[in-house]
Image (tube, rainbow, N blue to C red):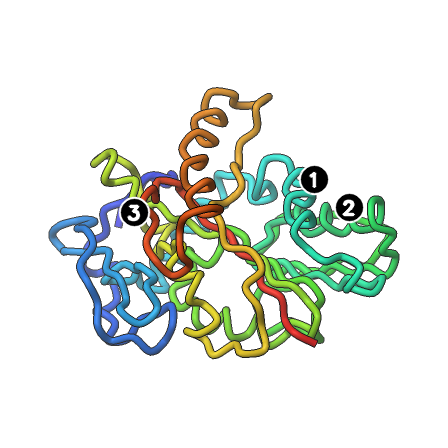
Amino acid sequence: MSTEISHKTVHLEEGDLDPPAVTCQVCGRGTDFRFVLRLQQAPDIDFQQCATCSACSVSRMPRDSYLAEFYARYYGEHDQGVTFRGAARFARHILASLDVPSLGGRARIVDYGGGDGSLACALADTLRERHGVRDLEVVIVDYANRQIARDYPVSYCSDLSGLAGSFDVVIASAVLEHVKQPVEVIRRLFAVLNPGGFFYARTPYSLPMRRLSAGFDLSFPMHLHDMGNVYWDNFLTTYGLSDCRLLVSRPSIVSTDFRANPLVTVLAHAMKFPARVERGFFSRPGRNLLWPFVGGWEVIIGKSR
């Protein structure tokens, strides 16, 4: 196995792959799949859509040993700490859609796949500076290679088995697509979410971009799943989360900014704008968008008290 590590799609060999899964790895229930597109040939790997939850996943998952080596080399060459350009901007974006007073002056935050903790700490900092929340704690679940110090508790663990207690805010931003079996992660994250708390997720919704450009890169094997509006609109029903409410389901925040990359940022906003209008005024939740060319989707879910 010889591979150049990058964000571009990599061709995997038969020995790098698990056998095809019988059930959907995202919802854990679906067994009926619709072909979406061929990702590679010899061996064949397709993106296929689960008829139960509407998530799209690759038909053959990389072996654990392959992914361990892949990410070991990747993180040996790249900075793991930066998960989003402008963490403070991202924090303000999330908090604008939260009922912060309902937190009651306390926020215990966990960020699954949160790198060095930049986003979670920015969220805690903004809660204190703009909303007067004083009782703060941050927990990061990731293989962070550098850590952030704050005057409130910030701790790190390498996987969900090390997570203790419950949380008021749970973040899973741009991480579920990397996990072979998201269903297990999703169940665990909602199990530790406090009543009255909030869950935020951001995932790729990139497959429609192939309709605009056959060369659009889908970042396999880093990205194993593609989760758009239909998946998220039906999320609570899929996982039986009757004690939760879908508060926000929309095209995701633009991850670049105007100062660092103005042309890409303008283009990203332009691509998302029709879907934002459609979503706000015309579309019905749970149905495919007429303009799905948004690149990513985000949700905020609240857990009832």
Q: Which percent across, then down, holds residue 262? A: 52, 21
Secondary element under disc 2, as helix, strand or loop, is helix
Q: Is residue 194 above or below residue 47?
A: below
Name the residue carrying label 3: 207
Name the residue carrying label 1: 88
Going by the numbered disc 1, the residue's amino acid type is Ala
Q: Does the CB distance between marks 1 and 3 fall below 8 Å?
A: no
Q: Does the CB distance between marks 3 and 2 fall below 8 Å?
A: no
Quarter of the rendering occupied by the C terminus: bottom right
Q: Nearer the viewer, residue 40 or 268?
A: 268
Q: Which residue does the image show at 48% across and 71% down from the upper left?
A: 236
Query: Is the residue marked by circle 1 packed among few (<14), some (14-19), or many (20+) residues within 10 Å?
Result: some
Q: Does the CB distance between marks 1 and 2 fall below 8 Å?
A: yes
Q: State left or right for residue 132 relative to residue 276.
A: right
Q: Which percent across, then down, holds residue 33? A: 21, 67
Query: Is the residue marked by circle 3 packed among few (<14), some (14-19), or many (20+) residues within 10 Å?
Result: many
Q: Which label's residue is closer to the chain start, 1 or 2?
A: 1
Q: Nearer the viewer, residue 84 or 143?
A: 84
Q: Which residue does the image show at 28% across and 36% down from the upper left?
A: 216
Q: Which label's residue is closer to the chain start, 1 or 3?
A: 1
Name the residue carrying label 2: 126
Q: Is residue 74 above or below residue 186?
A: above
Marks 3 and 2, how far apart at CA: 34 Å
Marks 1 and 2, how far apart at CA: 8 Å
Marks 1 and 3, how far apart at CA: 29 Å
Going by the numbered disc 2, the residue's amino acid type is Thr
Q: Is residue 286 above or below residue 88?
A: below
Please tell me how many numbered marks the rendered image carries: 3
Secondary element under disc 3, as helix, strand or loop, is helix
